[in-house]
Amino acid sequence: MNKRYAIPTVLIKRGPMRFFSQIDLTRVIERAIRRSELPVYYTQGFTPRIKMSFYGALKVGAEGRIPLKLYFIERIDTGEICARLQPQLPAGLTILPDSGDTRG
Amino acid sequence: MDYSQFQHPQRYVGNEWNAIRKSHTGKIPICIGYPHLYEIGMSNVGLRIIYGMLNQYRDIVCERVFLPGHDYAHYLKTQRKKLCSLETKLPLDQFQVIGLNLNSELNYPNVLELLSLGNIPLFSRERKDIIVTGGGIANPEPLAGFIDVFFMGEFEAGAEDFLRTLRASPRKQDRLRALAELPGFYIPQHYSSVFTGTGYRTEKKYPFARLPVGKRIVTDLNSSYYPRKWLVPHTSIVHDRAQIEISRGCPNHCTFCQARTVYSPYRERSAEKVLSLLEEIYRHSGYENFSFLSLSASDHSSIEELIDRAHSFCRTRRIGLALPSLRIGDVIGRLYKKLSALKKVSLTVAVEAASAQLRQRMNKHIEIESLFEAVDALKSLKIRHVKAYFMLGIPGETDDDIRSIGRLIHELKRRAGLQVNASVNIFIPKPFTGWEALPMPEERILQEKREILFQSSRGKKTKLSVSPLKRSLREAILSRGDRTLDAVIHRVWRTGGIEGYPGGNAWDHWESALREEKIDTHRILHRSLDAYPWSFLTPEAPRNQDRCHE
């Protein structure tokens, strides 16, 4: 089993992206990670998926912040991950390193 | 705008990955659309090809529109607002051209709903500036009153001509006049269509109109446009995957099939080209699922190489790969080893007729019985169920032929251990097929056939879905109809017969509209004529003319 490194980030959802649901968001993040070619960690089951953990959800129509943990198979600086993901995200989504004070 | 007051607000945002937003200054604005909901329209590959292709031109801006949900449509009507394009939220009536993909006849009333929500006059003769174009259907006559230009064939091959005409003059009548002289552009108002008692006669009203109209086709799929920057919706759509067209047309000649004529001739995209598209589209989209698009993938001359190489690309990146339209013989024969490497293999078989004799008559060559001998192969491919398509009401079909559908399903369960999901469609003698001149069975007889089918095919481990009779009749009337149907479609639209809206597909809308307009449905469905409303069109590809300029 691959070693994995958890990277705490915060996703900020606003503007046009507020109309997208939590399920939509996982799709958007997964495709952004695929386009970024970051060495992402996949779940090990029969249907491998990109592993990610959302800590909370926003209802459709609401703007706000969602703590999001991403997993990689190499140790990469959180800042670099966010810098490589941001250009792959649609307008209305911002990803930032989690400074640690957002998780309830 | 707060879209969250509507169901599925994602439909209206228009911020898909790779969506193209351009300034409109100094450009000709074109809006292309599909007359059904976003998640259905966005699954259409033709629309994506045209979207990407038109936006390549500096002086053109091409945006999209789909039919909004009924709640949003209600909001637009009550608030007196206009339906807008997705990209720049420009009202539809501000575009110079509205281009519609019409690949299902059932969507005809939806066309009117879409235009009306965009404040566009419905009848061609009432529109001063805007040109409404349509394409993707074989017999355009029922929509003749509404559409200014029908494009016949593949727009990749006609786009240059079309755009040149738009640039030459801003006036609608000048534009139509210029298009009239070009092959592939059918402008209904330039022709008359009359029923003579034994058939239809279509004539030019003006000397400049073309007869035959002709059809435009791409000669080489390897050099023709295909989108790389695949539009990726942020929400799920019906066909939620990137689709790569590996061939166009079909080399087989099934008698009932309309697609083989409409998409003729058969052409292939090379394995090299398909793989470079796969890599590029993946890089631009990050899509986790891909599928090949083809009327008959088994016939692709490099299908084995394609599966091998596509699979090795997809496996390392954990991309799902789906292969449509493989022949049974190939799935359990030469492609078996390659397919077993894929994670999930589903088996869909267009059996069409359960009796071999009927299949012979329709020139449909499949080896359904070979499934019984291939139990091991099926097991190792992890195929648990098979999806089987049948037709009911085929010319010359006996009651025993219908019962043989049930027997085949039963045998597949007993001998091959497969669950069967059978989907049965009622045969419609579609224009431009070998059976276009055959009468459709009477409604009463079709009803009896349905009963026999249900009685003989029900059972455990079988999912049987049969297309509703009235729906098939509606489709048959619209696909075989003449110009007088425009009044029917208009009435149905007025009473709310919109596909995809609550109560929209009720037969009542059609029954009263057909009666009010005194439409002779017997002539449309059951009479053999010496010429049909569509007979003046020639979708069979011409061999040496009307080729695209490449």
Image (spheres, coloured by chain):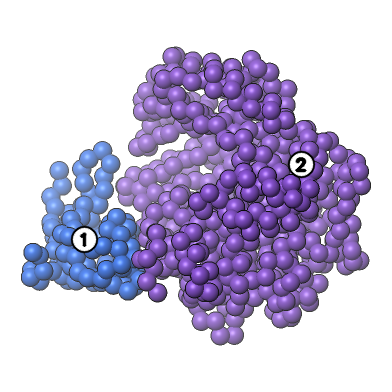
Query: Can you tell which quarter of the image residue B96 is in?
Result: bottom right
- Picture residue at 53% right of the left edge, 26% below the top: B329
**Callout 2: chain:** B
Q: Dot 1: within a 10 Å radius of its alpha carbon, few (fewer than 14), some, or many (20 or more) residues?
A: some
Q: Any mark on residue A57, and which?
A: 1
Residue at left 13%, top 63%? A8
State the SS at label 2: helix
- Name the residue located 56 percent from the left edge and 50 percent from the top edge: B504
Pick out the residue farthest to the bottom: B25
Q: Residue at x 81, y 40 (%)?
A: B523
Q: The blue chain is which one?
A: A
**Residue marked by disc 2:** B521
Which quadrant of the rendered structure holds the C terminus of chain B? Answer: bottom right
Q: In which quarter of the image is the N terminus of chain B?
A: bottom left
Q: Mark 1 lies on which chain?
A: A
Which chain gets the purple colouring?
Answer: B
Disc number for residue B47: none
